[in-house]
Image: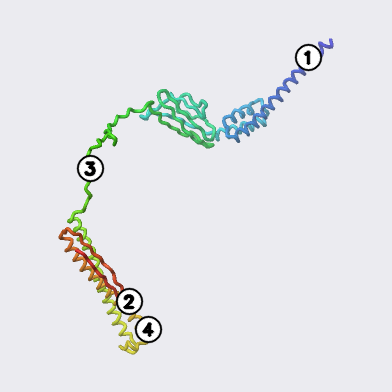
Amino acid sequence: MFVRRFLPVAVASAAIAFVASNARADEAACIAASENEVSMRKAGRLQEALKQLAVCAAPTCSSEVNAECTKRIGEVKDALPTVVVRATDSGGNDLTDVKVTLDGLPFASTLDGRAIPVDPGKHVLRFESAGRPPLERTLLFAEGEKDRRVTVVLGQSGAAPVEPVSVAPVVPPSSVPANAPEPVVAPASPSASSRGGGVRSAGFVVGGVGVAGVIVGGILGGLAIAKVSSAKGECVPANNCNANTNPAATQDMQTAGTFADASTGLLIGGGVLAAAGVVMVLVGGAPKERAGALWISPVVTAHGGSLGITGVW
């Protein structure tokens, strides 16, 4: 009677203890999954983090753990990048029968235009299609990057045939007969007309420089005369520049002297250059067997300058 009376109580107690033990085990698994998600998320393994959150968000977990994990599921999904992969042939036609691997692991068996989740970071995508050489792309995916478009072109296998190129045979030096005469190459020599044309062109340049010098010398001479006239009007006492006491008149006289010296040098040098240019033009117009030479030497003095010209024709 005693055993029969207390047996149901014992069975019920054992059942309650078993249920409580299983509940404690489930709660421990929930907490462990929640902690694992944190470490996996820090490592950038967001897809594995979602799997852990699915465990701790189950109804068997406590309400506190369940609510926290449910909230984190939304955060991880927002941070998880997605990619839309496409492949075309060399003509731009879409290919669907393409196998894609991610870092050596299966990623997509066919291409259907759908977005595929991928962990953030750098990854190597490898595309393989029958009859075409494989292609690899290294890409960097950022957190929160959604529906990134990646398109690759897979060409046909085998290269196009290359047309043969005809090349003339090259005769090695050893095949040339020993008694063959050596070619004689005459040294190039400029003709008399080309030499004369060069001298004539140089004559135009020299003559032009000389004419420019004469013009500038005339301008400076006119400025010198103007400065002398101005100085005479500024001399104190009037028109007595020998006993002048006006600094402005003295400065104008010095400037007039500088202009006069420069004018003299340019007139002499320009005239010589102009004459030399005329001679060179005349000499260059008639070709001769003997080449001419011309030397122009500048001569500078304290009060002017000149040019010396020496020639051989």
Front-most of residues 308 and 242: 308
Question: What is the distance, in whole Å, between disc 3 and disc 1 at their CAs?
Answer: 128 Å
Q: Work out whether 255 lies above or below 37.
A: below
Front-most of residues 128 and 172: 172
Give the residue type that dot 3 points to: Pro
What label does residue 222 carry, if any? none
Q: Which of marks 3 and 1 is in front?
A: 3
The percent position of residue 181, horizontal first and vertical second, equals: 22, 40
Question: What is the distance, in whole Å, between disc 2 and disc 1 at their CAs?
Answer: 141 Å
The single residue placed furthest to the top in the displayed view is 1
The local secondary structure at tag 2 comes to loop
The percent position of residue 8, horizontal first and vertical second, equals: 78, 14
Give the residue type that dot 2 points to: Ala
Q: Earlier in the sequence, mark 3 or mark 1?
A: 1
Question: Position of 238 compared to 184: left or right?
Answer: right
Give the residue type that dot 4 points to: Pro
The percent position of residue 117, horizontal first and vertical second, equals: 52, 30
The single residue placed furthest to the front in the displayed view is 179
Front-most of residues 34 and 180: 180
What label does residue 302 carry, if any? 2
Disc 3: which residue:
183
Classify residue 43 by image quadrant.
Answer: top right
Question: What is the distance, in whole Å, between disc 4 and disc 2 at their CAs?
Answer: 24 Å
The local secondary structure at tag 3 comes to loop
Disc 4: which residue:
247
Q: Work out whether 268 lies above or below 192.
A: below
Q: Earlier in the sequence, mark 4 or mark 1?
A: 1
Q: Which of marks 4 and 2 is nearer the N terminus?
A: 4
Question: What is the distance, in whole Å, between disc 4 and disc 1 at their CAs?
Answer: 140 Å
What label does residue 8 carry, if any? 1
